[in-house]
């Protein structure tokens, strides 16, 4: 499976500031996703990062708050803008791998633990 | 009703025992199913996909029951290292939906 790295691994930020999280994959992948996992909760999909076009956001998430870049097939960034304490969470990048006609499986980066004070 | 539901646990099980947990899904159009394992403060890792005929990987057996809309995970001869949260994941129309997970503690 693809090897996925994320930077930073953790950060503590002040409210009102923004943080950009980077996701790097060691191979070209078509589908990349950004998730959030709040304490004690399951994963929630924020958006699908599309290469060469705007990200596709899930209900409850908007581009102004979570701008995403996907300049190529191995890299994506997620920015958490104008942060508030409610944004404290783990942010995870994931990729989808599989073959046409078979089940596609998702693999996750190690996550970025964000604390907003 | 949540689309994917799991008993949150925790399941406290002695080492060497067999443990099983289920996950129910509400949408009959769900197409593919997975079990992920998540250790504390780590990312989820794919444990196994769940196939219609059921599948086994070492001590782990996954089953799918489409009629009753649930999947199950059985762990035999449990090890201390099996302690983790097990996430049920359902794919419907290219949407991946995660359950909240079942916490498993293997006791020495």
Image (spheres, coloured by chain):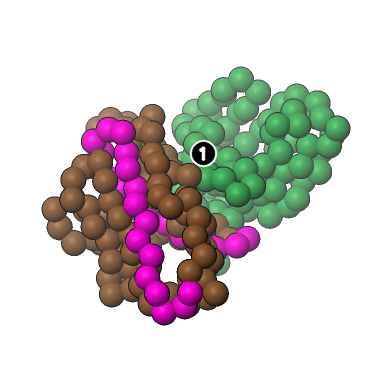
Chain colours: A brown, B green
Residue sitting at x 50%, y 55%: A10
Q: Is residue A13 magenta?
A: no
- The stretch in magenta equals A14-40
Secondary structure type for disc 1: strand
Please indicate, yes or no, whether residue B41 appears anywhere in the rendered image: yes
Q: Nearest the camera: A55 or A98?
A: A55
- Residue in the image at 81% along x and 26% along y: B16
* Residue wearing tag 1: B45
Q: Residue at x 59, y 56 (%)?
A: B100
For label 1, count other residues whose C-alpha is less than 10 Å away and answer few (under 14), some (14-19) or many (20+).
some
Q: For the C terminus of chain B, give its image quadrant.
A: top right
Position in image of residue A94 (x %, y %): 38, 46
Query: Is residue A85 toward the left or the right of residue A58 in the image?
Result: right
**Residue in the foreground of this view, choosing between A58 and B71:** A58
Quadrant of the image occupied by residue A78: bottom left
Relative to B69, is A70 on the left or the right?
Answer: left
How many labels, in total?
Answer: 1
Q: Position of residue B68 (x, y in %)?
A: 56, 47
Residue B81 position within the rendered picture, expressed as x and y whole percent measured from the top left:
70, 31
In the displayed structure, A76 sits above or below A65; it is above
Q: Position of residue B26 (x, y in %)?
A: 50, 57
The chain that hosts pointer 1 is: B
Q: Residue at x 52, y 71 (%)?
A: A116
A82 sits left or right of B80 in the view: left
- In the rendered image, the vertical position of residue B25 relative to residue A97, given as above or below: below
Q: Quadrant of the N terminus of chain B?
A: bottom right
């Amino acid at each position: 499976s693809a090897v996925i790295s994320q930077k930073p691994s953790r950060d503590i930020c002040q409210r009102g500031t923004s943080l950009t999280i980077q996701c790097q994959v060691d191979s070209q992948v078509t589908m990349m996703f950004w998730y959030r996992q709040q304490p004690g909760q399951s994963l929630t999909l924020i958006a699908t990062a599309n290469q060469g076009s705007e990200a596709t956001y899930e209900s409850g998430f908007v581009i102004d708050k979570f701008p995403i870049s996907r300049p190529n097939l191995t890299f994506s960034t997620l920015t958490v803008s104008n942060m508030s304490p409610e944004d404290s969470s783990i942010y995870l990048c994931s990729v989808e791998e599989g073959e046409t006609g078979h089940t596609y499986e998702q693999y996750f980066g190690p996550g970025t633990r964000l604390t907003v004070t | 009703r949540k689309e994917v539901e799991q008993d949150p646990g925790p399941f406290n099980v002695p080492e060497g025992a067999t443990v099983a947990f289920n996950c129910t899904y509400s949408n009959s159009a769900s197409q593919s199913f997975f079990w992920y394992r998540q250790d504390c403060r780590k990312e989820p890792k794919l444990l196994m996909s769940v196939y219609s005929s059921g599948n086994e990987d070492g001590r782990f057996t996954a089953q799918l029951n489409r009629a009753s809309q649930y999947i199950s995970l059985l762990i035999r001869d449990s090890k201390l290292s099996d302690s983790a949260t097990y996430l049920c994941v359902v794919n419907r129309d290219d949407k991946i939906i995660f359950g909240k997970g079942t916490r498993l503690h293997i006791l020495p």
